[in-house]
Image: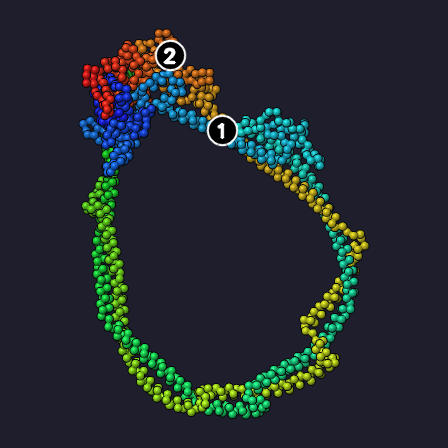
Amino acid sequence: MRLHRLEITAFGPFGGTQRIDFDDLSAAGLFLLHGPTGAGKTSVLDAVCYALYGGVPGSRQGAGLTLRSDHADAGTPTEVVLELTVGGRRLEITRRPEQLRPKKRGTGFTREKAYGALRERAAGEEWKALSRSLQEIGEEITQLLGMSREQFCQVVLLPQGEFARFLRAEDAARAGLLGRLFDTGRFAAVEDRLAELRRAAEARVRAGDERLLALGHRMRQAAGDASLPEMGTPAPATASAGTGRATPPAPRGTGRTRRASVPAPRAGEPPLAPGDPGLAEAVLEWAALARTNARERRDVAGVALRAAEREHRAAQARADEARELDRLQRRHAEALRRAEALEERRAERDALRERLERAHAAEDVAPALALRARAEEEHAAAAAAERQARALLPAGHHEAGAEQLAALERALREELGSLAAARRAEERAEEIVAETARLERAAAADEDVLADAAEWLASWETARGAHQRRVDEAQEALGRAEQLGGRLETERRRLDAARRRDRLVHEAAAAEARLRDARDEAAAAREHWLDLKDRRLRGIAAELAAGLAAGAPCAVCGATEHPAPARAGAGQVDRGAEEAALAASRRAEEAREEAARVLRPLGEALAVATADAGEATAAELAALVEDLERAHAEARRAGAALHTARQALHSAEGEYERRRSGQEEARLRIAAHATRREGLERELAALEREVTQARGGSESVARRAALLQERLGRLAAAAAAAREADRTADRRKEADAHLADAAYRAGFDTPRLAAEALLNAAARHELRQRLERWEREELAVAAELADESALAAARRPPADPDGALADVSEATRALRQASAEDAAARTRCDELDRLSAEALSDARALAPLRAEHHRVAELASLAAGTSARNERKMRLESYVLAARLEQVAAAATARLRRMSSGRYTLVHSDARTGGRGRSGLGLHVVDAWTGSERDTATLSGGETFFASLALALGLADVVTEEAGGVRLDTLFIDEGFGSLDEQTLDEVLDVLDSLRERDRTVGIVSHVADLRQRVPAQLQVVKERSGSVVRHRTAAGS
C-alpha cells in the first residue's frame, strides 16, 4: 500500500481544505511530520484511517459529528479524500461523516447522512466510479489491505507509547493486542466451544443422574418401607447364609418381615447427588433390595387374604341361617294376628253378603223403574212447554182447547197468502230507488272522468316533446360512449407500454451494470491470467529443471548432465496456477457473454415499449386514462337511460290513447244513464199506488205480513204443545202400572223398597271384591298356620340376625383390609419392577453420555490450560499467539541489534509467571555485553523506545505476511524520539532510512527540534486562528 494524495476539509483542527502530496514527501523515503502540540499532527493520521475505514483509531473513536472542525464555516462539509495504490490498483476514496448542514430553505440545520465514494483509475484512463455504498467500500478496502482497522492502526500508524507498554506488559495484556492483530479469536472460540460442549455434556449427565435419582425417590415412595436403607449405603443381606434362598416371611401378626440387619449410613457421609460416581450402581442395587422386600411383603399379604376370605364365607353362612329363622318366626306370628282379625269382623262380612243378594234381586225391577222415570220426565217437559206457549197468546185465547187453536191457525194462513203480490211490488219499488241512486253516482263519476281527460289531453304535446328529448339525449350519449371506449382502449395500451418501458429501463440499466461489471471482471481475469502466464514463462527454466533426473536427457538441450539447474524463485507460478487462472478467465468471459445475451432482449423490448408509449410519461398517460374512464363511465350511464326513456315515451303514448277513448266512452255512458232513469221513474209511480192500498195501517206491506206471521207462529206452537201434553200423560199412567207388577214379582212390597235396594255396577263390584278379599285372606291364613317349617321355627328360641350381620360386617372389613393390603403389595411389586426396568434402561443409556462427558471435559481442560496433562498451563489461543510472538521477536531483533550496536536481542519466553500462573507470552531481552537474559522492564527510557520501535517494525512485517503479502509502502511512527541520545538517534534513523531499500516510505511524527535538521523532507502543521494548515518544507527552506 502506498499513499499518493490526501485532501482534508473541515476535519479536526483543519478549518479549510488542506492537501498533502505523499508522492513528493516519499521521494526521500523518510519525512518528518512536525508541529506544535495540539496543531493536528495526529489528526493527519486520523484522516488517513478515516478515509480507509470510516473511523479513527480506537482510542480517539467517537461519534461522526466529533470529526467536524469547529473552525469550519457552517456551509463547508467535512470531507476526506485519499488517493492510494494497493494491490496494484490506483484508488480514490471520498468520505463524509454524518453531520449537520444549513437547511436550503428557511433557517436551522438538517442532518445529512454519511457519504462515501470509491473510484478507480487504470493506466492511461479516466477515473471510474466503483461504488457509493459505505458497506461495499469498507469490504473492498478491508479485502485489499488484508487487515482490520485496529491492525492497520498498529502496523501502519505506529501509535504513541503503545508498543512501549506492550514491551513491558503482562502476558494477559500482550495476549489482547496480539489476539486482535492476528485474529486468533477462532482459537478462543474453539476453547469456548469445547467449554460449551463440556457444560452441555455435563448437563446431559446431570440430567440423567437427576432422572435416576427421581426414579430412586419414586421407588422409595412405591416401596413404602421406612426400614429400607438410604440409597448409597451397603445393602442388607436378604438371603439365608450359605443356602442362597430367600429368608422366609415372618408369621402373620408380627407386622414386619424377617430380614438381616441393615447397617446405618456412615457418619458425615453426604447423600447421593447428580454427578456422583457410582450413582447408577447404587440406585440399581437399592432397587433390587426394594424388589426383594416387596415380594416378601406380597407373599405375607396373600396368606392373610386367603384366611380372611375363609372367615368371611363362614360369617356369611351364619348370617344367612339367622335371617331365614327370623323370617319364618315372623311369618307364623303374623298369621296368628291375621286369624284373630278375621274372626273379629265376621258379622260385618255377613251383612255385606246380604246387601249384595238384595241388590241382585232389585236388578229385575230396574227396567220398570227406568221406564217410569222417563215417562215422568217427558210429561213434565210437555206441560211446561204448553204453559209457555199459551202465555204468548192474546188474552182471549189462553183457555182455548186444541181444536179451537187449530181453527184460528187456518184463518191467519189464508190472510197472509193474500199479501204476497203486494210484498213483491214493494220490494220492486225499493230496487228501483237503489238503481236510480247508483245511476246518479255513475253519471257523476263519468263527469269527473271527462274533466280529468280534458285536463290531461291539454298538456299532451308538451309532455310528448319532453319524452322525445330524453330519448334523443340518451341516443347521443351512447354514440359518445362508443367513441370514448375506442380511444380509452388505445390509451390503455399506451399506458401499459409506458409502464413496461419504465420497468425495462431499470432492468436494462441493471443489466448494463452487470455487463460492465462482467467486462471488468473478464478483463481483470484475463489480465491476471496473462500476468501469471508471463511470470510462468519467465520461470519456465525452473519448472523444466524440476523435472530433470540424474542421467536423464534435458528436454531442452538433450544433455544428461545438469551442473546448475535453475531454481524456482519467490512467487514462482506453476502450470496448475496458470491453468486455474485461464479457467477463471474463461468463466468470466462466459459470464460477460451471458450478461450481454440477457441485455439484448431487454433492449429490444425497451425499444418496442418506447415506440408504443410515445413521448408521454406513465403518470401523464395514467391521468389521461383516468379522465377518459371517467368520461366514458358518465357517457355509459347517460346512454343506459335510453331504454327507460323509450319505455316512458311508449307508456305516455298508450296513456294518451287510453285517455282519449275513455273520454268518448264516458260521454256515451252519461247519455245511457239519463234514458234509464226516466223509465225507472215511471215504473216507480205505478208500484207506489199498489203498495199504499195493501199495507193498510202498517208502515209497510212487509211489516203487516211480519205481524201476521208472528201471530200464526204463536198459535201453531200453542196447539202442538197442548197435543203433546195429552200424549205424555197417557204414557205416565201405563208406566206406573208396569212398575207395580214388576216389584211384586221380585219380592218387594212397594216399588220404593225395590228402588232403595238397587245398586249400580260399580257398587256391586266393590261389594264382591271385598267379600272375595275376605275369603282369600281366610285361605292364606289357614295355609300359613299349617306350614310345618314355620311351626318348627316357632318352637325354636328367637333368632338374632343383627348380631350375625355384625359378625359379617367385621369379617367383610377384615377381608377388604386384607384385599387392599394384597392389592397394594402386588401393585408395589409391579410398580417397583416397572421403575427398576426404567432405571436400568436409563442407566444403560447414560453410560455412553458419561463416557462422552469424560472425553470432552478432558479435551476442554487441556485447551483451557487447566488440565494436569498441560504442564505449562498454556491456553490454546496463547499457544498460537506464542508462535506469532516468536516470529515478531525474530523480526524485531534484526532491527534491534542494529539500533543497539549489536547489544540487545529480543527473545520469546514461555516460562510460567508465578507459582500457579500460566506461561506462553513472555518477552525477554538478551544483553550480549553481559550474556544475561532479563526482563524488558529493566531497559532504560531510550532503550525502551528503540526496542519498542524495533518491535513495532517487526510486528508490521509479520502482520503484513499474515495479511497475504500486501506491501505496506507507507509507515508512520508517532513520537518517542526525544528519549534518544545523539548516537542512538543516528542509529535509529539509519535503520528507518534502510527501509527505503525495500521501497518504503516512513513518516516520523514528532516535535523534536533535532529531527528537523536530520530529516530533509518535512510536513509542517501550523496553528492559526482560522484553523491549522499544513506546509511542505525541506531542511533548507519551504
Residue ID for mark 1: 202
User: Alpha-carbon neighbours of circle 1 within 10 Å: few (<14), some, or many (≥20)?
Assistant: many
Residue at the disc numbered 2: 938
Identify the residue shown where x is 70% and y is 69%. 766
Residue 87 falls in which quadrant of the image? top left
Image spot of residue 982 (x, y percent): 28, 10
In the image: residue 200, left or right of residue 14:
right
Q: Residue at x 22, y 41 (%)?
A: 603
Q: Quadrant of residue 879?
A: top left
Residue 740 visible in rendering: yes
x, y percent for residue 318: 74, 48
Is residue 897 or residue 159 the one in the foreground? Answer: 159
Quick check: 477 above or below 874?
A: below
Q: Say above or below: 488 vs 431.
A: above
Q: In this view, which residue lies farthest toward the top?
A: 930
Secondary element at tag 2: helix
- Disc 2 vs disc 1: Cβ atoms closer than 8 Å? no
